[in-house]
Amino acid sequence: MVANVNPRDALNQIRRWIGERVATSYTRNGCRVSLANLPRERVVLDIDLAFPTDRAVKAQCDFILFYTVQDTLVVVPMELKQGDVDASEVVKQLQEGAHIASRLVPRNVKTNCLPLLVHGSKRVQRRQNEKLKHSSVTFRGKKLPIQTTRCSYEGNLAKALNIK
């Protein structure tokens, strides 16, 4: 049996791997995510810097946030959308983020994954919202619901992740 890795040690391993690919801006296409009220021990991977690709060919989320809570490493694949939301595309992008995170996080670390759509429109169109509600992202064999929050208000990420 392999001993569990301390989530802080895993976070430091991820931080070293990320290096210069750490996010310095938390905005995509006019949609901003606020890191206010998040744990200080965190790192945000900018997927475009880490895995440059033709977005028309490969769906990727925008960022992956990693942080620790007690004995758990929390992984948050994030997609930021200012305009119309295509639920099918969002699911593909978040799923790719979950795959990337799964490869980065050692298997023997207690992990919680929270896929998140950050959107700009006051409301996602009803049909797209229904698709999102019935969709999930798979992370290490578990199907996970997609959380949502709105762009550009202070504490939007902490609120969506239920961080007090």
Image (cartoon, grey):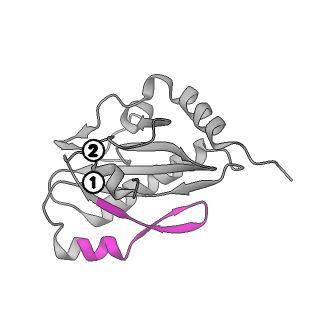
Count the numbered circles shown.
2
Are circles 1 and 2 on residues that touch, CB within 8 Å? yes
Q: In the rendered structure, which segment of residues is drawn in magenta?
A: 129-148
What amino acid type is highlighted by mark number 2? Val
Residue 46 among those drawn in magenta: no
Q: Is residue 13 left or right of residue 118?
A: right
Q: Is residue 48 left or right of residue 129?
A: right
According to the picture, the residue beneath numbered tag 1 turns out to be 118
Give the camera-side residue of 60 and 110: 110
Label 2 crowding class (10 Å Cα cut-off): few <14, some 14-19, many 20+?
many
According to the picture, the residue beneath numbered tag 2 turns out to be 33
Q: Is residue 164 left or right of residue 112?
A: left
Q: Position of residue 76 (x, y in %)?
A: 44, 50
What amino acid type is highlighted by mark number 1? Val
What's the residue at 43%, 44% (across, down)? 64
Q: Which element is circle 1 on?
A: strand
The relative height of residue 146 versus residue 109 in the rendered view (above or below) is below
Is residue 79 at all visible to an observer of this figure?
no
Is residue 88 at all visible to an observer of this figure?
yes
Q: Position of residue 75 (x, y in %)?
A: 50, 49
